[in-house]
Protein backbone atom coordinates (compact mmCIF):
# COMPACT_ATOMS: atom_id res chain seq x y z
CA UNK A 1 0.00 0.00 0.00
CA UNK A 2 3.04 2.28 -0.03
CA UNK A 3 2.23 5.50 -1.96
CA UNK A 4 -1.33 4.33 -2.65
CA UNK A 5 -3.00 7.67 -1.82
CA UNK A 6 -0.72 9.51 -4.25
CA UNK A 7 -1.19 6.84 -6.94
CA UNK A 8 -4.99 7.01 -6.86
CA UNK A 9 -4.94 10.79 -6.35
CA UNK A 10 -2.97 11.39 -9.56
CA UNK A 11 -5.39 9.31 -11.64
CA UNK A 12 -8.52 10.86 -10.11
CA UNK A 13 -7.08 14.37 -10.54
CA UNK A 14 -6.64 13.72 -14.28
CA UNK A 15 -10.31 12.68 -14.38
CA UNK A 16 -11.18 15.96 -12.64
CA UNK A 17 -9.42 17.86 -15.41
CA UNK A 18 -10.69 15.77 -18.34
CA UNK A 19 -13.69 13.50 -17.70
CA UNK A 20 -13.39 11.98 -21.18
CA UNK A 21 -10.39 10.04 -19.87
CA UNK A 22 -12.91 7.87 -18.03
CA UNK A 23 -14.03 6.52 -21.41
CA UNK A 24 -10.49 5.47 -22.29
CA UNK A 25 -9.89 3.13 -19.36
CA UNK A 26 -11.75 0.10 -18.02
CA UNK A 27 -11.51 1.02 -14.34
CA UNK A 28 -14.06 -0.15 -11.78
CA UNK A 29 -14.74 0.79 -8.16
CA UNK A 30 -12.78 -2.25 -6.97
CA UNK A 31 -9.64 -0.73 -8.54
CA UNK A 32 -9.64 1.99 -5.86
CA UNK A 33 -8.89 0.95 -2.27
CA UNK A 34 -8.47 4.28 -0.47
CA UNK A 35 -11.69 5.86 0.80
CA UNK A 36 -11.09 9.19 -0.97
CA UNK A 37 -10.06 7.55 -4.22
CA UNK A 38 -13.17 5.34 -4.23
CA UNK A 39 -15.46 8.28 -3.37
CA UNK A 40 -14.20 10.63 -6.06
CA UNK A 41 -14.04 7.92 -8.72
CA UNK A 42 -17.64 6.85 -7.98
CA UNK A 43 -18.79 10.49 -8.11
CA UNK A 44 -17.11 11.04 -11.47
CA UNK A 45 -18.44 7.80 -12.98
CA UNK A 46 -21.96 8.71 -11.94
CA UNK A 47 -21.73 12.17 -13.51
CA UNK A 48 -20.18 10.74 -16.69
CA UNK A 49 -22.97 8.16 -16.98
CA UNK A 50 -25.43 11.09 -17.03
CA UNK A 51 -23.65 12.52 -20.05
CA UNK A 52 -21.50 15.24 -18.47
CA UNK A 53 -18.15 15.98 -20.14
CA UNK A 54 -16.62 18.51 -17.75
CA UNK A 55 -16.67 19.07 -14.02
CA UNK A 56 -17.79 22.11 -12.04
CA UNK A 57 -19.32 22.71 -8.63
CA UNK A 58 -22.83 23.43 -9.93
CA UNK A 59 -22.88 20.08 -11.77
CA UNK A 60 -21.91 18.24 -8.59
CA UNK A 61 -24.38 20.03 -6.31
CA UNK A 62 -27.22 19.71 -8.84
CA UNK A 63 -26.85 16.00 -9.58
CA UNK A 64 -25.67 14.30 -6.38
CA UNK A 65 -27.65 13.07 -3.38
CA UNK A 66 -27.51 14.79 0.01
CA UNK A 67 -25.28 12.03 1.44
CA UNK A 68 -22.77 12.43 -1.40
CA UNK A 69 -22.79 16.23 -1.09
CA UNK A 70 -22.20 15.91 2.66
CA UNK A 71 -19.16 13.69 2.04
CA UNK A 72 -18.04 16.07 -0.74
CA UNK A 73 -18.11 19.01 1.69
CA UNK A 74 -16.28 16.97 4.34
CA UNK A 75 -13.47 16.32 1.82
CA UNK A 76 -12.97 20.05 1.27
CA UNK A 77 -15.60 20.73 -1.40
CA UNK A 78 -14.79 22.39 -4.71
CA UNK A 79 -11.64 24.01 -3.34
CA UNK A 80 -9.96 20.60 -2.98
CA UNK A 81 -10.91 19.56 -6.53
CA UNK A 82 -9.82 22.89 -8.02
CA UNK A 83 -6.45 22.60 -6.30
CA UNK A 84 -5.89 19.16 -7.84
CA UNK A 85 -6.95 20.45 -11.27
CA UNK A 86 -4.43 23.29 -10.99
CA UNK A 87 -1.44 21.15 -10.04
CA UNK A 88 -1.97 18.03 -12.19
CA UNK A 89 -0.61 17.67 -15.72
CA UNK A 90 -2.97 15.40 -17.69
CA UNK A 91 -0.23 14.81 -20.28
CA UNK A 92 1.24 12.38 -17.73
CA UNK A 93 -2.01 10.42 -17.51
CA UNK A 94 -0.64 7.37 -19.32
CA UNK A 95 2.13 7.13 -16.72
CA UNK A 96 -0.25 7.65 -13.79
CA UNK A 97 -2.73 5.04 -14.99
CA UNK A 98 0.04 2.51 -15.66
CA UNK A 99 1.31 2.94 -12.10
CA UNK A 100 -2.21 2.30 -10.77
CA UNK A 101 -2.53 -0.83 -12.94
CA UNK A 102 0.87 -2.03 -11.71
CA UNK A 103 -0.01 -1.47 -8.04
CA UNK A 104 -3.31 -3.30 -8.50
CA UNK A 105 -1.46 -6.24 -10.05
CA UNK A 106 0.84 -6.34 -7.01
CA UNK A 107 -2.15 -6.27 -4.64
CA UNK A 108 -3.83 -9.14 -6.51
CA UNK A 109 -0.62 -11.16 -6.44
CA UNK A 110 -0.28 -10.58 -2.69
CA UNK A 111 -3.89 -11.63 -2.06
CA UNK A 112 -3.35 -14.74 -4.18
CA UNK A 113 -0.47 -15.81 -1.95
CA UNK A 114 2.58 -14.54 -3.83
CA UNK A 115 5.32 -13.61 -1.40
CA UNK A 116 6.58 -10.40 -2.98
CA UNK A 117 8.95 -9.66 -0.09
CA UNK A 118 10.90 -12.92 -0.15
CA UNK A 119 14.21 -12.80 -1.96
CA UNK A 120 14.45 -14.97 -5.05
CA UNK A 121 17.21 -15.86 -7.50
CA UNK A 122 16.93 -14.31 -10.96
CA UNK A 123 19.76 -15.00 -13.39
CA UNK A 124 22.21 -15.47 -10.57
CA UNK A 125 21.15 -12.34 -8.68
CA UNK A 126 19.24 -12.19 -5.43
CA UNK A 127 16.26 -9.82 -5.78
CA UNK A 128 13.16 -8.77 -3.84
CA UNK A 129 10.22 -8.96 -6.33
CA UNK A 130 8.37 -5.95 -4.88
CA UNK A 131 11.43 -3.71 -5.17
CA UNK A 132 12.10 -4.84 -8.72
CA UNK A 133 8.45 -4.56 -9.84
CA UNK A 134 8.17 -0.97 -8.63
CA UNK A 135 10.74 -0.07 -11.28
CA UNK A 136 8.64 -1.71 -14.03
CA UNK A 137 5.48 -0.89 -15.96
CA UNK A 138 2.32 -2.94 -15.43
CA UNK A 139 2.91 -4.89 -18.64
CA UNK A 140 6.54 -5.59 -17.72
CA UNK A 141 5.43 -7.08 -14.39
CA UNK A 142 3.08 -9.58 -16.04
CA UNK A 143 5.60 -10.27 -18.82
CA UNK A 144 8.28 -11.04 -16.23
CA UNK A 145 6.12 -13.62 -14.48
CA UNK A 146 4.95 -15.16 -17.76
CA UNK A 147 8.56 -15.49 -18.89
CA UNK A 148 9.52 -17.05 -15.57
CA UNK A 149 6.63 -19.54 -15.74
CA UNK A 150 7.51 -20.49 -19.31
CA UNK A 151 11.08 -21.27 -18.19
CA UNK A 152 9.73 -24.13 -16.04
CA UNK A 153 8.74 -26.05 -19.18
CA UNK A 154 5.44 -27.78 -19.93
CA UNK A 155 6.18 -29.60 -23.15
CA UNK A 156 3.72 -27.42 -25.06
CA UNK A 157 3.94 -24.12 -26.85
CA UNK A 158 2.28 -21.20 -25.02
CA UNK A 159 2.07 -19.06 -28.16
CA UNK A 160 -1.02 -20.52 -29.77
CA UNK A 161 -3.25 -17.69 -31.00
CA UNK A 162 -6.01 -19.58 -32.81
CA UNK A 163 -7.02 -23.21 -32.67
CA UNK A 164 -9.78 -24.44 -34.97
CA UNK A 165 -10.56 -27.41 -37.17
CA UNK A 166 -10.65 -26.17 -40.76
CA UNK A 167 -14.11 -26.23 -42.28
CA UNK A 168 -15.79 -23.81 -44.70
CA UNK A 169 -18.98 -23.10 -42.75
CA UNK A 170 -21.84 -20.91 -43.99
CA UNK A 171 -20.67 -17.89 -41.97
CA UNK A 172 -17.24 -17.99 -43.63
CA UNK A 173 -18.81 -18.23 -47.10
CA UNK A 174 -21.13 -15.30 -46.32
CA UNK A 175 -18.18 -13.22 -45.10
CA UNK A 176 -16.33 -13.94 -48.33
CA UNK A 177 -19.36 -12.92 -50.37
CA UNK A 178 -19.64 -9.66 -48.45
CA UNK A 179 -15.90 -9.02 -48.56
CA UNK A 180 -13.76 -9.97 -45.59
CA UNK A 181 -11.76 -6.75 -45.70
CA UNK A 182 -13.77 -4.30 -47.76
CA UNK A 183 -13.28 -0.75 -46.58
CA UNK A 184 -15.28 2.40 -47.30
CA UNK A 185 -15.04 3.19 -51.04
CA UNK A 186 -13.89 6.57 -52.32
CA UNK A 187 -15.10 5.98 -55.86
CA UNK A 188 -18.03 8.41 -56.24
CA UNK A 189 -19.55 11.33 -54.32
CA UNK A 190 -23.18 10.88 -55.35
CA UNK A 191 -24.85 12.35 -58.44
CA UNK A 192 -24.67 15.72 -60.16
CA UNK A 193 -27.53 17.94 -61.36
CA UNK A 194 -27.79 15.84 -64.53
CA UNK A 195 -28.15 12.59 -62.58
CA UNK A 196 -24.67 11.37 -63.52
CA UNK A 197 -22.12 9.99 -61.05
CA UNK A 198 -19.66 12.45 -59.53
CA UNK A 199 -16.54 10.33 -60.00
CA UNK A 200 -13.74 10.60 -57.48
CA UNK A 201 -11.14 7.79 -57.74
CA UNK A 202 -13.09 4.71 -58.86
CA UNK A 203 -10.18 2.61 -60.18
CA UNK A 204 -7.84 3.42 -57.28
CA UNK A 205 -10.63 2.74 -54.76
CA UNK A 206 -11.29 -0.68 -56.28
CA UNK A 207 -7.59 -1.48 -56.39
CA UNK A 208 -7.11 -0.87 -52.65
CA UNK A 209 -10.57 -2.14 -51.55
CA UNK A 210 -11.49 1.21 -50.00
CA UNK A 211 -10.39 2.71 -46.69
CA UNK A 212 -10.58 0.35 -43.72
CA UNK A 213 -11.62 1.38 -40.21
CA UNK A 214 -8.90 1.13 -37.57
CA UNK A 215 -6.15 1.99 -40.06
CA UNK A 216 -4.02 4.95 -41.13
CA UNK A 217 -3.51 5.94 -44.78
CA UNK A 218 -1.11 8.62 -45.98
CA UNK A 219 -0.78 10.71 -49.13
CA UNK A 220 2.81 11.85 -49.63
CA UNK A 221 3.64 14.64 -52.02
CA UNK A 222 5.99 17.52 -52.60
CA UNK A 223 5.07 21.05 -51.61
CA UNK A 224 2.29 22.59 -53.77
CA UNK A 225 1.39 19.36 -55.58
CA UNK A 226 -2.15 19.52 -54.17
CA UNK A 227 -2.16 17.03 -51.28
CA UNK A 228 -4.87 18.84 -49.31
CA UNK A 229 -6.97 19.26 -52.46
CA UNK A 230 -6.62 15.54 -53.24
CA UNK A 231 -8.06 14.74 -49.82
CA UNK A 232 -11.03 17.06 -50.52
CA UNK A 233 -12.08 14.69 -53.33
CA UNK A 234 -11.66 11.65 -51.04
CA UNK A 235 -13.65 13.39 -48.27
CA UNK A 236 -16.51 14.15 -50.67
CA UNK A 237 -16.65 10.44 -51.53
CA UNK A 238 -16.60 9.41 -47.86
CA UNK A 239 -19.44 11.83 -47.11
CA UNK A 240 -21.44 9.98 -49.74
CA UNK A 241 -21.00 6.87 -47.56
CA UNK A 242 -22.27 8.66 -44.42
CA UNK A 243 -18.93 9.20 -42.71
CA UNK A 244 -18.45 11.97 -40.14
CA UNK A 245 -15.14 13.69 -40.78
CA UNK A 246 -12.76 15.70 -38.60
CA UNK A 247 -10.04 17.75 -40.34
CA UNK A 248 -7.03 18.89 -38.29
CA UNK A 249 -4.64 21.16 -40.18
CA UNK A 250 -1.37 22.90 -39.40
CA UNK A 251 -1.20 24.08 -43.01
CA UNK A 252 -4.33 25.87 -44.17
CA UNK A 253 -7.16 27.93 -42.68
CA UNK A 254 -10.79 26.88 -42.52
CA UNK A 255 -11.61 29.54 -45.13
CA UNK A 256 -9.34 27.88 -47.70
CA UNK A 257 -10.93 24.48 -47.05
CA UNK A 258 -14.43 25.96 -47.35
CA UNK A 259 -13.54 27.47 -50.72
CA UNK A 260 -12.17 24.13 -51.93
CA UNK A 261 -15.34 22.30 -50.95
CA UNK A 262 -17.52 24.96 -52.59
CA UNK A 263 -15.68 25.13 -55.92
CA UNK A 264 -15.52 21.33 -55.98
CA UNK A 265 -19.29 21.10 -55.64
CA UNK A 266 -19.81 23.93 -58.14
CA UNK A 267 -17.79 22.01 -60.72
CA UNK A 268 -18.62 18.38 -59.97
CA UNK A 269 -22.26 18.69 -58.92
CA UNK A 270 -23.55 21.86 -60.61
CA UNK A 271 -21.29 21.55 -63.68
CA UNK A 272 -20.52 25.26 -63.21
CA UNK A 273 -16.91 26.26 -63.88
CA UNK A 274 -17.09 30.05 -64.14
CA UNK A 275 -16.35 30.53 -60.44
CA UNK A 276 -12.76 29.73 -59.44
CA UNK A 277 -10.90 29.76 -56.11
CA UNK A 278 -9.19 33.03 -57.05
CA UNK A 279 -12.49 34.67 -58.02
CA UNK A 280 -14.11 33.58 -54.76
CA UNK A 281 -11.27 35.03 -52.71
CA UNK A 282 -11.36 38.34 -54.62
CA UNK A 283 -15.11 38.70 -54.15
CA UNK A 284 -15.80 39.69 -57.75
CA UNK A 285 -19.02 37.71 -58.18
CA UNK A 286 -21.73 37.99 -60.81
CA UNK A 287 -25.43 37.41 -60.16
CA UNK A 288 -25.09 34.00 -61.81
CA UNK A 289 -22.16 33.20 -59.48
CA UNK A 290 -24.24 34.16 -56.44
CA UNK A 291 -27.12 32.00 -57.61
CA UNK A 292 -24.82 29.00 -58.03
CA UNK A 293 -23.27 29.59 -54.59
CA UNK A 294 -26.73 29.67 -53.01
CA UNK A 295 -27.49 26.35 -54.70
CA UNK A 296 -24.31 24.75 -53.32
CA UNK A 297 -24.98 26.22 -49.86
CA UNK A 298 -28.45 24.67 -49.83
CA UNK A 299 -27.12 21.32 -51.04
CA UNK A 300 -24.38 21.27 -48.38
CA UNK A 301 -26.76 22.09 -45.57
CA UNK A 302 -29.24 19.45 -46.67
CA UNK A 303 -26.64 16.68 -47.10
CA UNK A 304 -23.45 17.37 -45.15
CA UNK A 305 -24.00 19.96 -42.43
CA UNK A 306 -22.86 18.69 -39.03
CA UNK A 307 -20.66 15.98 -40.57
CA UNK A 308 -17.46 17.93 -41.32
CA UNK A 309 -15.50 19.75 -38.63
CA UNK A 310 -12.27 21.73 -39.06
CA UNK A 311 -9.61 22.44 -36.42
CA UNK A 312 -6.58 24.63 -37.13
CA UNK A 313 -3.50 24.14 -34.95
CA UNK A 314 -0.41 26.34 -34.85
CA UNK A 315 2.21 23.61 -35.18
CA UNK A 316 2.68 19.86 -35.51
CA UNK A 317 2.02 19.09 -31.84
CA UNK A 318 0.88 15.47 -31.73
CA UNK A 319 -0.32 15.69 -28.11
CA UNK A 320 -2.80 18.41 -29.18
CA UNK A 321 -3.83 16.38 -32.22
CA UNK A 322 -4.46 13.28 -30.09
CA UNK A 323 -6.48 15.26 -27.55
CA UNK A 324 -8.72 16.79 -30.23
CA UNK A 325 -9.24 13.44 -31.96
CA UNK A 326 -10.17 11.73 -28.71
CA UNK A 327 -12.53 14.54 -27.74
CA UNK A 328 -14.36 14.60 -31.07
CA UNK A 329 -14.55 10.82 -31.48
CA UNK A 330 -15.90 10.22 -27.97
CA UNK A 331 -18.03 13.32 -27.59
CA UNK A 332 -19.37 13.95 -31.09
CA UNK A 333 -19.05 10.60 -32.88
CA UNK A 334 -16.57 11.50 -35.63
CA UNK A 335 -15.40 8.31 -37.34
CA UNK A 336 -12.87 9.64 -39.90
CA UNK A 337 -9.91 11.95 -39.24
CA UNK A 338 -7.67 13.82 -41.70
CA UNK A 339 -4.41 15.23 -40.31
CA UNK A 340 -2.79 17.72 -42.66
CA UNK A 341 0.34 17.70 -42.66
CA UNK A 342 3.35 15.62 -41.55
CA UNK A 343 6.46 17.33 -42.91
CA UNK A 344 9.85 16.13 -44.13
CA UNK A 345 11.46 19.52 -44.59
CA UNK A 346 15.07 18.62 -43.89
CA UNK A 347 17.94 18.82 -46.38
CA UNK A 348 19.66 15.92 -48.12
CA UNK A 349 21.97 15.42 -45.15
CA UNK A 350 18.95 14.38 -43.14
CA UNK A 351 17.83 15.25 -39.65
CA UNK A 352 17.71 12.14 -37.51
CA UNK A 353 15.87 13.71 -34.61
CA UNK A 354 13.10 14.95 -36.89
CA UNK A 355 12.91 11.55 -38.59
CA UNK A 356 12.41 9.85 -35.24
CA UNK A 357 9.75 12.38 -34.26
CA UNK A 358 7.82 11.75 -37.49
CA UNK A 359 8.00 7.99 -37.01
CA UNK A 360 6.84 8.32 -33.39
CA UNK A 361 3.98 10.67 -34.30
CA UNK A 362 2.77 8.41 -37.12
CA UNK A 363 2.76 5.40 -34.79
CA UNK A 364 0.79 7.34 -32.17
CA UNK A 365 -1.76 8.38 -34.78
CA UNK A 366 -2.05 4.80 -36.05
CA UNK A 367 -2.53 3.53 -32.47
CA UNK A 368 -5.31 6.07 -32.01
CA UNK A 369 -7.05 4.87 -35.18
CA UNK A 370 -6.91 1.29 -33.94
CA UNK A 371 -8.07 2.23 -30.44
CA UNK A 372 -11.19 4.05 -31.64
CA UNK A 373 -11.68 2.02 -34.86
CA UNK A 374 -11.70 5.13 -37.06
CA UNK A 375 -10.44 5.79 -40.58
CA UNK A 376 -7.20 7.76 -40.28
CA UNK A 377 -5.96 9.91 -43.17
CA UNK A 378 -2.87 12.10 -43.28
CA UNK A 379 -0.80 14.22 -45.65
CA UNK A 380 2.96 13.85 -45.75
CA UNK A 381 5.27 16.44 -47.27
CA UNK A 382 8.19 14.71 -48.98
CA UNK A 383 11.84 15.71 -48.79
CA UNK A 384 12.68 18.27 -51.46
CA UNK A 385 16.03 16.64 -52.20
CA UNK A 386 14.19 13.77 -53.96
CA UNK A 387 12.40 16.05 -56.48
CA UNK A 388 13.15 14.83 -60.01
CA UNK A 389 12.82 11.14 -59.17
CA UNK A 390 10.45 9.70 -61.77
CA UNK A 391 9.30 6.46 -60.14
CA UNK A 392 8.26 7.19 -56.56
CA UNK A 393 8.60 4.59 -53.83
CA UNK A 394 9.30 4.63 -50.09
CA UNK A 395 12.86 5.84 -50.71
CA UNK A 396 11.42 9.38 -51.07
CA UNK A 397 10.65 9.21 -47.34
CA UNK A 398 14.43 9.35 -46.78
CA UNK A 399 15.30 8.38 -43.19
CA UNK A 400 11.60 8.08 -42.27
CA UNK A 401 10.90 4.93 -44.31
CA UNK A 402 9.75 3.20 -41.11
CA UNK A 403 6.56 5.26 -41.32
CA UNK A 404 5.44 2.84 -44.03
CA UNK A 405 5.40 -0.06 -41.56
CA UNK A 406 2.40 1.27 -39.61
CA UNK A 407 0.37 2.37 -42.63
CA UNK A 408 -2.48 0.50 -44.27
CA UNK A 409 -2.05 2.55 -47.41
CA UNK A 410 0.64 4.87 -48.77
CA UNK A 411 0.13 6.93 -51.93
CA UNK A 412 2.86 9.14 -53.37
CA UNK A 413 2.14 12.07 -55.69
CA UNK A 414 4.29 14.30 -57.88
CA UNK A 415 3.97 16.72 -60.79
CA UNK A 416 4.08 15.30 -64.30
CA UNK A 417 6.81 16.69 -66.56
CA UNK A 418 5.98 17.71 -70.13
CA UNK A 419 8.59 15.27 -71.49
CA UNK A 420 6.63 12.39 -69.96
CA UNK A 421 3.66 13.23 -72.20
CA UNK A 422 5.76 13.39 -75.39
CA UNK A 423 5.73 10.05 -77.29
CA UNK A 424 9.11 10.95 -78.81
CA UNK A 425 10.82 11.54 -75.47
CA UNK A 426 12.85 8.93 -73.62
CA UNK A 427 10.83 9.90 -70.54
CA UNK A 428 7.47 9.06 -72.15
CA UNK A 429 5.22 7.46 -69.51
CA UNK A 430 3.04 5.44 -71.97
CA UNK A 431 -0.45 6.49 -70.78
CA UNK A 432 -3.33 4.07 -71.27
CA UNK A 433 -6.95 3.56 -70.34
CA UNK A 434 -8.63 0.31 -69.39
CA UNK A 435 -11.55 -0.68 -71.59
CA UNK A 436 -13.86 -3.62 -70.99
CA UNK A 437 -14.28 -5.86 -74.04
CA UNK A 438 -16.07 -9.22 -73.79
CA UNK A 439 -15.83 -9.13 -69.98
CA UNK A 440 -12.07 -8.54 -70.16
CA UNK A 441 -10.14 -5.38 -69.45
CA UNK A 442 -7.82 -4.35 -72.24
CA UNK A 443 -5.38 -1.44 -72.42
CA UNK A 444 -6.16 1.32 -74.87
CA UNK A 445 -3.47 3.91 -75.63
CA UNK A 446 -4.31 7.43 -74.40
CA UNK A 447 -2.74 10.73 -75.41
CA UNK A 448 -3.08 13.39 -72.66
CA UNK A 449 -3.53 17.08 -73.40
CA UNK A 450 -0.04 18.54 -72.90
CA UNK A 451 -1.52 21.96 -72.12
CA UNK A 452 -3.38 20.62 -69.07
CA UNK A 453 -1.95 20.21 -65.55
CA UNK A 454 -1.22 16.62 -64.55
CA UNK A 455 -0.29 14.74 -61.41
CA UNK A 456 0.94 11.17 -61.03
CA UNK A 457 -0.11 8.91 -58.13
CA UNK A 458 1.92 5.86 -57.04
CA UNK A 459 0.13 3.39 -54.70
CA UNK A 460 3.23 2.31 -52.76
CA UNK A 461 1.44 0.22 -50.14
CA UNK A 462 -2.03 -1.27 -50.46
CA UNK A 463 -4.02 -3.98 -48.74
CA UNK A 464 -4.47 -5.78 -52.05
CA UNK A 465 -0.71 -5.98 -52.63
CA UNK A 466 -0.98 -4.44 -56.12
CA UNK A 467 1.65 -1.76 -55.57
CA UNK A 468 3.27 0.39 -58.24
CA UNK A 469 6.63 -1.19 -57.43
CA UNK A 470 5.18 -4.58 -58.38
CA UNK A 471 3.08 -3.61 -61.40
CA UNK A 472 5.10 -0.67 -62.73
CA UNK A 473 1.79 1.21 -63.12
CA UNK A 474 0.84 4.62 -61.72
CA UNK A 475 -2.30 6.76 -62.04
CA UNK A 476 -2.44 9.84 -64.25
CA UNK A 477 -4.69 12.52 -62.77
CA UNK A 478 -5.85 15.69 -64.49
CA UNK A 479 -5.68 18.54 -62.00
CA UNK A 480 -7.80 21.67 -62.05
CA UNK A 481 -6.47 23.71 -59.17
CA UNK A 482 -8.93 26.55 -59.88
CA UNK A 483 -11.82 24.19 -59.07
CA UNK A 484 -10.06 21.87 -56.56
CA UNK A 485 -10.81 18.90 -58.82
CA UNK A 486 -8.73 15.82 -59.58
CA UNK A 487 -9.92 13.58 -62.39
CA UNK A 488 -8.78 9.96 -62.59
CA UNK A 489 -8.17 10.01 -66.37
CA UNK A 490 -5.71 7.23 -67.17
CA UNK A 491 -2.92 4.96 -65.97
CA UNK A 492 0.67 4.94 -67.14
CA UNK A 493 4.06 3.23 -66.86
CA UNK A 494 6.55 5.89 -65.75
CA UNK A 495 10.25 5.46 -66.38
CA UNK A 496 12.74 4.79 -63.62
CA UNK A 497 15.50 7.30 -63.06
CA UNK A 498 15.61 11.06 -62.60
CA UNK A 499 14.82 14.15 -64.64
CA UNK A 500 16.34 17.56 -64.03
Image (spheres, rainbow, N blue to C red):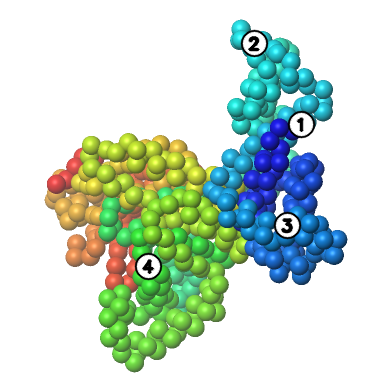
Picture coordinates of residue 175 (x, y %)? 66, 47
Picture coordinates of residue 101 (x, y %)? 68, 37
Per the model, the C-alpha gap separating discs 4 and 1 is 51 Å
Which numbered circle lies on residue 107?
1
Residue displayed at 82% across by 61% down: 70
Instruction: Give the SS element for disc 2.
Output: strand
Q: Nearer the viewer, residue 351 or 117?
A: 117
Tags 4 and 1 in contact by the CB under 8 Å rule?
no
Residue bearing the label numbered 4: 253
Residue displayed at 45% across by 45% down: 362
Crowd band around label 2 with a 10 angstrom C-alpha radius: few (<14), some (14–19), many (20+): few
Q: Is residue 224 left or right of residue 87?
A: left
Q: Quadrant of residue 352?
A: top left
Per the model, the C-alpha gap separating discs 2 and 4 is 61 Å
Picture coordinates of residue 500 (x, y %)? 14, 47
Q: Nearer the viewer, residue 47 or 144?
A: 47
N-terminal of the two: label 1 or label 3? 3
Picture coordinates of residue 137 (x, y %)? 61, 31
- Quarter of the image with the N terminus in it: top right
Crowd band around label 4 with a 10 angstrom C-alpha radius: few (<14), some (14–19), many (20+): few
Instruction: Give the SS element for disc 4.
Output: loop
Instruction: Give the SS element for disc 1.
Output: helix
Q: Is residue 259 visible?
A: yes
Q: Nearer the viewer, mark 3 or mark 2?
A: 3
In this picture, is 92 found above or below 46? above
Tags 1 and 2 in contact by the CB under 8 Å rule?
no
Q: Nearer the viewer, mark 2 or mark 4?
A: 2
Per the model, the C-alpha gap separating discs 1 and 3 is 29 Å
Which numbered circle lies on residue 126?
2
Residue bearing the label numbered 3: 76
N-terminal of the two: label 2 or label 4? 2
N-terminal of the two: label 1 or label 2? 1
Amino acid sequence: MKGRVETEGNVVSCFFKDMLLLDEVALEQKDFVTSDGLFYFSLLKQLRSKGFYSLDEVTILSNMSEDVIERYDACGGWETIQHQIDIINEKNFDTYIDILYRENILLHMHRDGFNLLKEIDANGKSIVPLTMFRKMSAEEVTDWYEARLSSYGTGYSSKIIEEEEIDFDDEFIENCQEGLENGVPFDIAGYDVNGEEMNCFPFLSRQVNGLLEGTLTMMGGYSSTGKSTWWVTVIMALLNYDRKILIISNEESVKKFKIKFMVWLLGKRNRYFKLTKKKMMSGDLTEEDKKQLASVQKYWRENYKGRVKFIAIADANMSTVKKKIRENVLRYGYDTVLYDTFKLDFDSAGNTRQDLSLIKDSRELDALCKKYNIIGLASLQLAINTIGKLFLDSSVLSNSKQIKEVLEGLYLMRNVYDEELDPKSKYYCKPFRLKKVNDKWIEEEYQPDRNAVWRMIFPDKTRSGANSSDTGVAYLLKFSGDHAIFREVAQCRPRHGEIR
